[in-house]
Amino acid sequence: MTHTAKKVILVADDDAMNREIMEAFLSAEDYEVILANDGTSALRQAKTVQPDLIILDVKMPDMTGYDVCKKLRRDAATRDVAVMIVTGFDAKEDREEALQAGANVFFPRPFGGDDLITQVSRLLQD
């Protein structure tokens, strides 16, 4: 996949294995990947790095991905950044909560690398 300018993706997940897997898939497609292991560092890096896309896990120790998404949407510096909520929860209520928090996409686990890349590509073209 060719990108005119390298897109930056911030991945926030408290599980190191999940971060590494997503980083491997995304880096292979020539995206620049920044990692955060909790919501607080995700918020800090979102303001500092100004990523093109933020991928948030729902369950993190300090705040949920939903809470992070709400804070991103309230901040002028990050309100327009695309957000993908990634989680092992796939109930209708989880989807609704993600969208109400301001996420562009709710993406349930497990997923394959091709599905992730397709969804990321779609979000970055908008």
Image: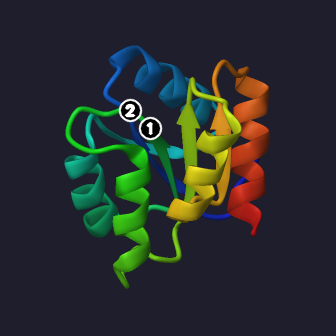
Q: Residue 58 shows which numbered tag?
A: 1
53 w.r.t. 1: above or below = below
104 w.r.t. 84: above or below = below
Q: Residue 40 shows which numbered tag?
A: none
Q: Is residue 80 left or right of residue 42?
A: right
Give the residue type that dot 2 points to: Lys
Asked if marks 2 and 1 touch (Cβ < 8 Å), the reply is yes
Q: For residue 31, what is the image quadrant?
A: top right
Quote the CA–CA distance across marks 2 and 1.
4 Å
In which quadrant of the rendered image does the N terminus lie? top right
Give the residue type that dot 1 points to: Val
Place of residue 26 in the rendered image (x, y in percent of width and height, measured from the top left): 59, 35
Q: For residue 83, what is the image quadrant?
A: bottom right
Q: Residue at x 56, y 52 (%)?
A: 97
Classed neighbour count for the residue bearing mark 2: other residues with Cα under 10 Å, few (<14), some (14–19), many (≥20)? some
Residue lying farthest to the top in this orientation: 17
Q: Tell me, yes or no, if residue 71 can be seen here.
A: yes
Q: Is residue 102 left or right of residue 29?
A: left
Q: Residue at x 78, y 27 (%)?
A: 114
* Residue at the disc numbered 2: 59
Place of residue 79 in the rendered image (x, y in percent of width and height, measured from the top left): 46, 76
Q: Nearer the viewer, residue 48 or 68?
A: 68
Q: Nearer the viewer, residue 107 or 18?
A: 107
In which quadrant of the rendered image does the C terminus lie? bottom right
Q: Secondary structure at mark 2?
A: loop
108 w.r.t. 112: above or below = below
Q: Residue at x 75, y 44 (%)?
A: 119
Q: Secondary structure at mark 1?
A: loop
Residue lying farthest to the front in this orientation: 93
Place of residue 37 in the rendered image (x, y in percent of width and height, measured from the top left): 27, 34
